[in-house]
Structure formats: C-alpha cells, structure tokens
Image: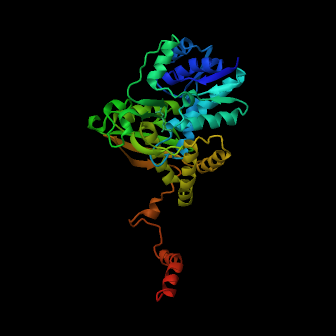
Amino acid sequence: MGKTVLAYSGGLDTTTCIAWIKEKYGNEVITVTVDVGQQEDFKEIEERAYMAGSSKHYFVDAKDEFANDYIAMAIKANAMYEGKYPLSTSLARPLIAKKVVEIALRENADSVAHGSTGKGNDQVRFDVTIRALYPQVKVIAPVREWNMSRDEELKYLISKGIPYKPSRGEFSIDENLWGRSIESGRLEDPWVEPPEEAFAWTVSPEKAPDRPEYVEIYFENGIPVSLNGDRMNLVDLIKHLNIVGGRNGVGRVDHIEDRVVGIKSREVYEVPAATILIEAHRDIEKLTLPKSILRFKGLIEEQWSYMIYDGLWADPLREALEAFINETQKHVEGSVRLKLYKGGLRVVGRKSSRSLYKNELSTYASTSTFDQKQAIGFINLFALQTLVYREVNSNA
Ligand code: ARG
C-alpha cells in the first residue's frame, strides 16, 4: 500500500480526493491543511478529513512565513499581474506545496496530491513546485483525472457513506491573507456585473461611508512596518488594511486574465490591503529611488510577476530577480499617507529622511539654488543628435 500526502482545503473537491485516492490507488491518505490566512474553522476541517478517511491530519500555520517570505517580496516587486491582479492565489501555492512536501518527506510518502483541475493555473504551480522539491515523488491530481461534476462528487461521497454538507454557493472561492479570488457562476459571462453576493471583504463603494478615511504607512527597506504610527508585524498590518480598505469599498478588481494554459478567464478579486500597500510602496519608491532604477525595475517587476503567476517559483531566475529587487530596497524608507473614499484610493502625502526630493531645487520661489542658465548647455548636448539628424535629412 502506497502513502499519499494530500493538500486538503476542506472543500468538496479535496474531500472527494481522500475517498477517491484510497479507492483508485489503494493508498493510505494523509491530509495537510495549510493556514495562509483563509477564514476557516480548522477544527471542523480536521474532523471532515477524518470522516472522509484520512489516516492522519496535519495543520500548518504558515501565515507569518507567507507574509514575510512571499507577500513582502510581492510588495517590493509592486507585483500586479497584467496590471490588475496582486497574485494572491498564485503566491500561496508554492508555499502550500512546500509544506505538503515537508510532510511527505517526514512521512516517507511516495506520492503527493492536490485538488486542482486540469484547466487552471494552480495545477502548474503545485506540480512544478512539488517536483522541484521532491523529484522522486509521484504527483496525483484526481480532479484532473476523474471528470466528475460537483453533483457527481456529492453522489460519490454518499455512495461511500461519507457525510458532506455542501456549503459553497454559486461561486468558487480561494482566500488567503493577500486576497480573495472569486470565479464561476454568473461571473463566467464577462458582460455581467459582479453581483453583491460575490463579495465578502468589501462593501460596495455606494454603501461606503460618506467621510474619507486616512491611513499612514511607514516603510523600511521597502517593507511596511507600521500603520498609523503603530509598529506591527506584517500579518497584522495586512489584516488591518483588509478591514480598513474593505469598509471603504477599496480593492475590488474585475479582470479578464490570461491563464498559463492559454485560456482567457474572467476573474473577480477582493484585495484591499494589496491595493493599498502596492500603491503606497510605488509612491515611496518614487520619492527615494533615482529615475534609472525606477525605469529599469519595471522590467524586473513584470518578469517576476509573470514567473509567480506561471508557477515558476522554483526557477533560479526568480531568485536572481529578487537579488536585484532587494538591492534596490535598501533605502526605500518613509511614510505614505493615503485617503480612502467610496472605493477610491489616493496617495495624498509622503515623506522620508531619504527623500531625493529637494525643495531648494524644485521650487519656483526665490529660495531656489538651481542655476537655470546651466540648462542651456545641457539642452544643446541633449538634443544634438535629434537636431543633426533633421538637418542632414531635411531634403529627403
Ligand atoms: N485566477 C487566479 C490565479 O490563477 C485565482 C484562481 C482562484 N481559484 C479559485 N478557486 N477561485 O491565481
């Protein structure tokens, strides 16, 4: 009898996986639930795992690791896939895979399983990371193999005598500290406006308070370390901002997204903290980094975001890009003040002891120390090739 370690979320798919792997492969199934900040009753999930036939259940609290090793880098990288999606689901997958592999190694398991479908990105993220960290292991993705609808999964569980109370409504949800992803149901028609029931973290902007709310975020080495003057760890800071952003209707995203496997899909997200923190981080970078780095870093950021989305966490290019990003963050320090109002978000102030903004240079007042006459010589050289080209080719 083989031994399989399954990444278990507690949902219908992975619950069915337990029974199915036991029947189809004749394996013992060990379940692992990784806490990356999803709001779930983990005790209940554990009970469900045993009820469905798990022989041993592990619970792993990975919130701090998720925040400090994954989200922090996404903030430093201003990571927004295709300009809109802060990669909340994408970032958690390699961490879940790592935790599951750690347990597979400890338990001497010969296979690892996950509940991703064959149409999405998550299968790529899980498969690649698991195989990178544990090359000898077999990866099983039952949902990709079995072709059952949700109703058929429920019937299958009943036939095995496993009680399962379907809790899910119309939408498919994936949730963690960095965001909530909402798919399927009515959202599959990209013309249909997301109904209010799709949202759980944010109020609709129309219902948000009529008064703006301000937040002040302090960054050190590119990482947010305090909120409104209170120093806190990254997990708490993100939780707070999800609440503050959510009650002001900030962080709703509606996006046509390109999956790794070529499919275009309509994705809806609630990402209040991510929206606020990346906007703030971009702003403090503009105050503290020179134009050379700001321009070049954009290319690195885009590449990093693609790699995370595409599930290539294990590829050495990621670490090489991060070496560059970390190098740029050494002096990214200071405060950003933002105004949240009815779904909108604006930076309205920033300050830093490492600010490159010099009032005596930029001011139009008489206190300016900038010698304007020096600009004449600069422009002569700056425009030289443009002007020579036009002169040479004026008759062409
Ligand atoms: N499209 C996102 C991604 O690939 C989120 C997928 C979320 N999954 C879900 N079950 N809703 O990262």
Whether residue 40 is visible here, answered yes or no, is: no
Closer to the camera, 371 or 335? Answer: 335
Q: How is the image coloured?
A: rainbow
Tell me where residue 126 appears, x and y as whole percent. 60, 34
**Along the line of sight, the residue nearer the viewer: 27 or 225:** 27
Quadrant hosting residue 109: top right
Residue lying at 36% horizontally and 42% vertically, measured from the top left:
190
Above/below status of 162 relative to 207? above
Q: Residue at x 33, y 33 (%)?
A: 203
State the residue at coordinates (39%, 66%): 364
The answer to whether residue 331 of the structure is visible from this angle is yes
**Residue 196 sits in which quadrant?**
top left
Relative vertical location of residue 167 with respect to residue 78 in this rendering, above or below: above
Image coordinates of residue 47 in percent, x first then y, are: 53, 12
Please name the residue shown 39% across and 67% down the image: 366
Give the image location of residue 124, x and y in percent: 59, 38
User: Is 286 located above or below residue 91 in the figure?
Assistant: below
Residue 213's spot in the image, x, y percent? 34, 38
